[in-house]
Image (cartoon, grey):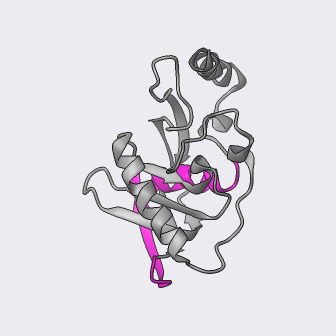
Amino acid sequence: MLQMKLCGDLVLREKCAPVGEITPDILRTLDEMVQMMRDQNGCGLAAPQVNITKRFLVMMNPDTEEVFKMINPKITAKSEKSVVLEEGCLSVLGPDDLPVFANVSRPESVDVEWMNERGEVLAAHMSGLPARIVQHETDHLDGILFIDYLSPVKREMVMRKVRKHKK
């Protein structure tokens, strides 16, 4: 069974290796990650969050509940216009065992390419929440957390809450 890695775990800071072959193990893990994401009321989950340093993730469009299982996702273009929205992360929990949230500026829309479970290359233009989610989750594959986009003062405020969770 998969276990969620939390802020401070070094696996969350590793750059993930591309998936060379889509194995039954990866397919099973993707299914488990979708279930875990749903169980925790999340809208995305990346492999390093469950201690796997490979480039794959799952995400859900909160508006349509469409689930994407993305293998080797790559953002190929970003809009010049940015938008500030509140973000949280299932790996960044506060003292109440719930995600800590903070405002993050990200491009409003992105173009993304990935492989699905059958090895087919897909591409999509995403805007709004799906664009935010795919950026957040692909950042995880490069060892980047949303708190890295915060000012030092805001990051310290979030980390204070995270440290209280660990006690």
Q: Residue at x 60, y 40 (%)?
A: 5
Q: In front here: 79 or 116?
A: 116
**How far across and down, in percent of the image, does residue 4 sit?**
54, 42
- Does the magenta-highlighted stretch encompass residue 123? yes
Dividing the picture into quadrants, the one containing residue 16 is: bottom right
* Quadrant assignment for the C terminus: top right
Q: Residue at x 40, y 65 (%)?
A: 68
Can I make out residue 66 in this image?
Answer: yes
Image position of 152 (left or right of 64): right
- Relative to 66, residue 12 above or below: above
**How far across and down, in percent of the image, does residue 78 sit?**
56, 61
Bounds of the magenta segment? 117-143
Which residue is the extreme one toward the front?
Answer: 1
Can I make out residue 112 in this image?
Answer: no
Q: Residue at x 71, y 46 (%)?
A: 11
Q: Residue at x 55, y 54 (%)?
A: 46
Q: In front here: 144 or 108?
A: 144
**How far across and down, in percent of the image, does residue 146 sit?**
60, 39
Please count the marks in the image: 0
- Does the magenta-highlighted stretch encompass residue 101? no
- Relative to 95, residue 10 above or below: below
**How far across and down, in percent of the image, does residue 148 sit?**
68, 37
